[in-house]
Structure formats: structure tokens, C-alpha cells
Image (cartoon, rainbow, N blue to C red):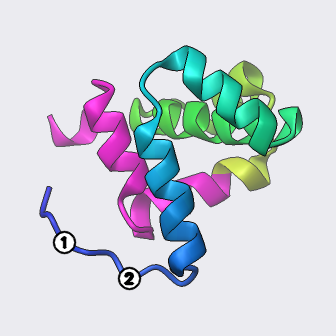
Amino acid sequence: MEDYHHHSKFKNEHVDEFFEAILKLEDLNECYRFFEDVCTIKEIQSIAQRLQVAKLLQLNEKYTEIEKQTKASTATISRVNRCLKYGADGYTLILDRLGYKNKKQE
């Protein structure tokens, strides 16, 4: 994957500082502690659900199976799929690092 500076629509100094803070977290325990304070449980669960949807899409699962496994709506699955295909490659970047290569690329 090409390394480039992504020009985000929401980039500003406060978001930069937030992301810098995330990069300072050293383990799962610190992530739990920080995100429990910063986010609602529902927000954390929604983000985690989107990552699971992206993983299953990357593994070429069908929408019906993804819906069953994650309890995500078809609207959420479609949105994540659009991000995988036309987004900033953030899902692809992290899924590759987690070991979930796109089956179509192999």
C-alpha cells in the first residue's frame, strides 16, 4: 500500500491531538480505560461492529451471513462496503495488519 498523507475532511488540530493520544496507548487495558472515558459503550460497540463487518466483507461473506453474525443492518453493511471500495483505505490498512487479506487479491 502506498504511503501518503490523506487529506481528511475533518482534519484539524483537535483531531490531530486526539489521534496522537490514541497512538500513545500501549496495550488493550489502556485502550479500554481511555475509550470507556471518551466514548459511550454504544459508540465503542458500533465502531467494533463496523470493523467486524469490514473483516467479513474482506473475507467475501454474503450480506445475509454478515447480518447474522454481527447484527448489523444492511445499511451499515452497505456503508462499510462503500468505504472498503471507495474510501480512504483505512479499513484495508488495518485489516491487512490484522492478517485479513482480501480473498479476491490472492
Residue 7 is marked as: 2
Q: Residue at x 36, y 40 (%)?
A: 94
Q: Residue 33, image x and y in percent?
A: 69, 25
Magenta includes 39? no
Q: Which residues are magenta?
A: 78-106
> Image quadrant of residue 85?
bottom left
Label 1, residues with CA under 10 Å away: few <14, some 14-19, many ≥20: few
The C terminus: image quadrant: top left
Question: Left or right: 89 with respect to 72?
Answer: left
Q: Could you classify mark 2 by the number of other residues whose Cα lies within 10 Å: few (under 14), some (14-19), or many (20 or more)?
A: few
In the image, residue 61 lies at what x, y percent?
Answer: 51, 30
At label 1, the amino acid type is Tyr
Q: Position of residue 72 (x, y in %)?
A: 78, 37
Q: Nearer the viewer, residue 10 or 58?
A: 10
Q: Let me know if residue 95 is in the magenta part.
A: yes
Q: Is residue 10 visible?
A: yes
Q: Which mark is residue 12?
A: none
Q: Is residue 36 left or right of residue 106?
A: right
Give 7 or 38, whichever is nearer the viewer. Answer: 38
The kind of residue tagged 2 is: His
Residue depicted at x 58% and y 27%: 31
Q: Quadrant of residue 59?
A: top left
Q: CA distance from mark 1 to mark 2?
A: 9 Å
In the drawing, does residue 69 fall left or right of residue 61?
A: right
Asked whether the beta carbons under mark 1 and mark 2 sit within 8 Å of each other, the answer is no
Q: Which residue is mark 1?
A: 4
Nearest the viewer among 67 and 32 is 32
SS for dot 2: loop
Kindly state the secondary structure of the residue where label 1 is placed.
loop
